Amino acid sequence: MPVDPRKLAKFRTNARRRIEDLRVRTRDSLEVAVDTMMEERIDSFFRVEEGLEEIDKSLRAIEEEVAVVFDLSGAVRISSRLEFMEDRYDELDSEVRQRPRRRKGKINLADFLRAAGGGGESLGETKSEINNTFDAYKALGLEDGCSLADVTAAFRKLAKGLHPDARNGDRSSEPELRRIIEAHQFLKEYLSLFNTEPPVAERGRFSPAE
């Protein structure tokens, strides 16, 4: 689904600002790591250095995608990947400076998919099971047009029952948990990224590919 050119331009400007800000902070953290970790925490330094370099590499790829994004689906993916990179940066920077993490811990779609998949694939390389609002609402047991508050409430209720911590470590429900996390992320981005009103059934189903 094409996006209003003005909103798309605003999204690109904001995304590039976030990329540059994170790039500057990543380089600063690496400099601090060199100064403070090389002597007493050498093993941790090499792991942090690799993580920060991975972030810088991912930012270059995301920056290229920003230049060619033209629809809501692409904007959602970019926003999600940036959020994951920001969380990953804060994790590494907290280790460098030996302080608690600043960003509030939360379930993160990209983080979960990486862990559940058992590999190092990025969000952009993970096959999506949710491709439109109809599928997303259905996965959460909601009707088309429900508000973001309804989406969040339904997601929390479902996630609480499906999470391995609530099932004595049983991970058999991970595929379903993966699906509702993706559905929640999709609808959260769709309903908030451009301050979009929730679609209603009478208007038909929304699909980024339309």
Image: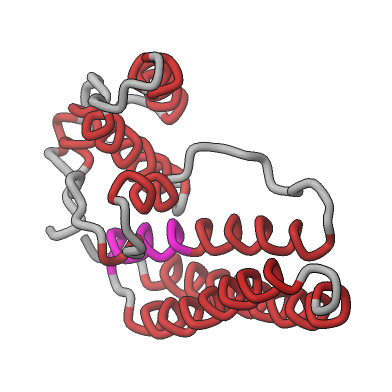
Q: Is residue 75 magenta?
A: yes
Point 53% across, 57% down: residue? 83
In this rendering, would 3 be left or right of 150? left
Q: Nearer the viewer, residue 59 or 32?
A: 32
| Residue 35 picture quarter | bottom right
Residue 152 image offset from top left, x and y in percent: 44, 26
User: Looking at the image, is 154 positioned above or below residue 180?
Assistant: above
Residue 171 image offset from top left, x and y in percent: 30, 27
The quarter of the rendered structure image containing the N terminus is bottom left
Residue 161 image offset from top left, x and y in percent: 36, 14
Q: Nearer the viewer, residue 17 or 70?
A: 17
Point 42% across, 15% down: residue? 166
Point 46% across, 52% down: residue? 193
Q: Is residue 184 magenta?
A: no
- The span picked out in magenta is 71-81
In this rendering, would 163 be left or right of 20? left
| Residue 23 picture quarter | bottom right
Question: Total number of numbered labels?
Answer: 0
User: Looking at the image, is 67 positioned above or below residue 185?
Assistant: below
Q: Magenta residues: mostly which secondary structure?
A: helix
